[in-house]
């Protein structure tokens, strides 16, 4: 999880000194844009062997570091 947090901090560096928490709105705060989402997917697949199906490439799935559960 620390590698993911560090990656998100690096991606969010263009947004200034934004503190990234599980509730941080990653898209709305400018941490992730369409290109960064593709980079994040590549990072997840490479570092953690987590495949992300193409149908999961929707903004809702990338809004926060932690997704809320029903």
Image (cartoon, rainbow, N blue to C red):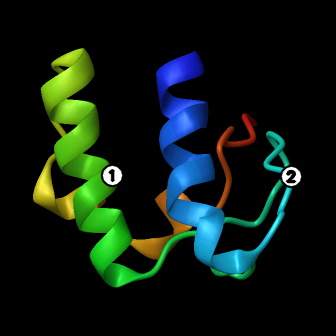
Q: Is residue 44 above or below residue 60?
A: above
* Label 2 environment density (alpha carbons within 10 Å; few <14, some 14–19, many ≥20): few
**Residue on which the image places disc 2:** 19
Quarter of the image where the N terminus is located: top right
Disc 1 from disc 2: Cα separation:
18 Å
Identified at 48% across, 42% down, the residue is: 7
Residue 50 shown left or right of residue 58 in the figure: left
* Residue 40 - label: 1
Identified at 14% across, 29% down, the residue is: 46
Helix, strand or loop status at disc 1: helix
* Residue 69 - label: none
Residue 60 appears in view: yes
Identified at 79% across, 49% down, the residue is: 20
- Find residue 51 and report its image quarter: top left
Helix, strand or loop status at disc 2: loop
Residue 15 in the image, given as x and y percentages of width and height: 70, 77
Identified at 58% across, 18% down, the residue is: 2
């Amino acid at each position: 999880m620390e590698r993911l947090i560090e990656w998100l901090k690096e991606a969010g560096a263009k947004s200034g000194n934004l503190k990234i928490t599980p509730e941080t709105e990653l898209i709305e705060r400018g941490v992730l844009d369409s290109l960064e989402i593709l980079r994040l997917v590549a990072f997840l697949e490479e570092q953690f062997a987590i495949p992300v199906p193409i149908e999961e490439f929707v903004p809702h799935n990338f809004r926060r570091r932690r997704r809320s559960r029903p």
